[in-house]
Image (spheres, rainbow, N blue to C red):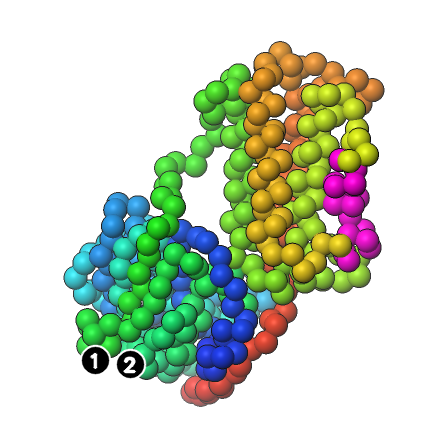
Amino acid sequence: MKFIPTLIILLCCSFIAKAQQSQVSNSWTAFSQSIDMSMDKERKFILKAAVKAEIADSTAWAGLWARVDMKNNENGFFDNMGDRPIRDPEWKEYIIEGTIGKNAERLLIGGLMLSDGTFYFDNFSLQIEDSNGIMTDFPLGNADFEKTAKGEKIDSWLEGIGGTNSSSVLEYTLESSSDAFSGAHSLMITGEGTETMDFGPAEIKSEDGYAPQLGVLISMLDDLKERVEYRVKGMSQHEIDHLHDENANRIGALVMHLAAAEAFYQVRTFENRGFNEEEAKKWGLALDLGKKAQEEFKGKPVSYYLEEFTKVRERTKALFKSASDEWLLEEVPSYGMNNYYAWFHVMEHQSSHLGQVLFLAKRIPPEAEINAPTEMKN
C-alpha cells in the first residue's frame, strides 16, 4: 500500500500569480503550500519551522498553520496555533503535529500573522508517516526561503487570503531578510496600519445606546454580519462571481440579498409600508434574486456588496436607537407578526444565507493552477 501526495506549487510563475491576485484590506495575512493527498489509511504528520515575531502590541502574533481538507466536506485536522501564539522576538522552532485522514483530499501548510509587527519565517519541514509507521521527510518548495521574495511573490508559496485565487493584503509587505535562522535568507513579512483586532470573549450583550432588548438584537445582527464579512472579504472576482449551477445564486448576489431584505424590514416595521418606487428600483432585483439577478450581480468587487450591506446596517442601528423595547412587542399591521419576530426573521434569514455562502465557497473550482507533481512512494 502507498500514499501519493502531489506537491502543488501555486506560485511557480510570478507573472501568472500577479495576474490572479487582487488586493484587500485586512488585519491578518498568511502564506501556504497545498499538497494533494491520496491515503490508504490515517497517517500522522509533523510540520516544523523557525519563527520569530517583533510585535507592535499585545494583539499581534504569528503562528504556523496546517489544515486537512477532506472529501465529502467532512471535518479534517486544523491548527493555527491560536491557543499558543508566537510573540517571541528570538528565533525558535515550533511544531504542529496532526493526522491526515483516510478520506483526505489535500493538506495545506504555512504561516500566518496578525496585526502590526515584523514576522520572520525560516526552515519549514514536513514529515508524513509511511506505511511502516516511520516519519518520512516530504519535500517542500523553497522551504528555507533561499529563493528570495520580491514584491507580493514568494517562490513556491501562495501569499494572501481567500483560497486558491487569493488576495494579497494591503497592510502587509514581504521581502527576504538576511536575519535567518540558518542559511542566508529568511522570509520577512511586515504588517503596518492594520485595524486592532478584538480578541475578547464571544458574547451576546446589549450594546450601548439602545433599549436593552434592542441592544441585544443589534449584538446578534452584527455578529452575523461579521461572519458573512469574514468569509467573503478576501474573495477574488472569480470566487464572488462563481455560479454553482443554473439555479444557484452568485455569492455577491447573496450578500446584496441580505442587504435588500434588511432594508425591506426597515420600512415595513418602522414605516408600515413596502418599498417605494425608488427603493424597489435599487433593491427589488436583489430581494427577488433569480435569473435576472444572476446577470446583474457579477463583475462587481466584493467591496461593493459589503459597502451596501454596511450602509443598510448603519440605518438599522439609527432606527433602533429611536425605538423602545415596548415597540418590539407591537404588531406589524397586516403582517401576522410583531416587530420582535420580524427582526428575529432578519437574523435567521442572514444565518440561512450564510450557510449557502459557506456551501458555495467550498465548491468554487480553481480559476487556474500550476502543478509541479512530486511523488513519495513507500
Name the side, left or right, on which 84 lies relative to 323.
Answer: left
Q: CA distance from mark 1 to mark 2?
A: 7 Å
**How many labels sit on residues?**
2
- Asked where in the image residue 333 lies, by quadrant, the reply is top right
Overall secondary structure of the magenta section: helix
Q: Position of residue 82 (x, y in %)?
A: 35, 52
Amino acid found under the numbered disc labelled 1: Ala
Circle 2 SS class: loop
Q: Is residue 320 above or below residue 149?
A: above
Q: Secondary structure at mark 1?
A: loop
Q: Residue furthest left?
A: 90
**Does residue 49 appear anywhere in the picture?**
no
**Which x, y percent locates residue 213?**
55, 19
Observer-nearest of 356 and 48: 356
Residue drawn at point x = 62 percent, y = 48 percent: 305
Q: Earlier in the sequence, mark 1 or mark 2?
A: 2
Q: Is residue 153 above or below residue 275?
A: below
Question: Residue 341 lies in magenta, yes or no?
Answer: no
Q: Name the residue beneath numbered marker 2.
A: 146
Tell me: residue 194, above or below residue 174. above
Question: How dense is the environment of label 1, judged by Cα within 10 Å: few (below 14), some, or many (20 and up)?
Answer: some
The residue wearing badge 1 is 184
What range is drawn magenta here?
A: 279-295
Residue at the image point whose x is 25% and y is 46% from the top? 57
Residue at (52% x, 23% y) in the render: 215
Q: Residues within 10 Å of mark 2 (few under 14, many from 20)?
A: many
Q: Does the segment drawn in magenta span residue 283? A: yes
Residue positioned 56% across, 59% down in the render:
235
Side of 338 relative to 177 (left or right): right
Q: Amino acid at mark 2?
A: Glu
Q: Quadrant of residue 217?
A: top right
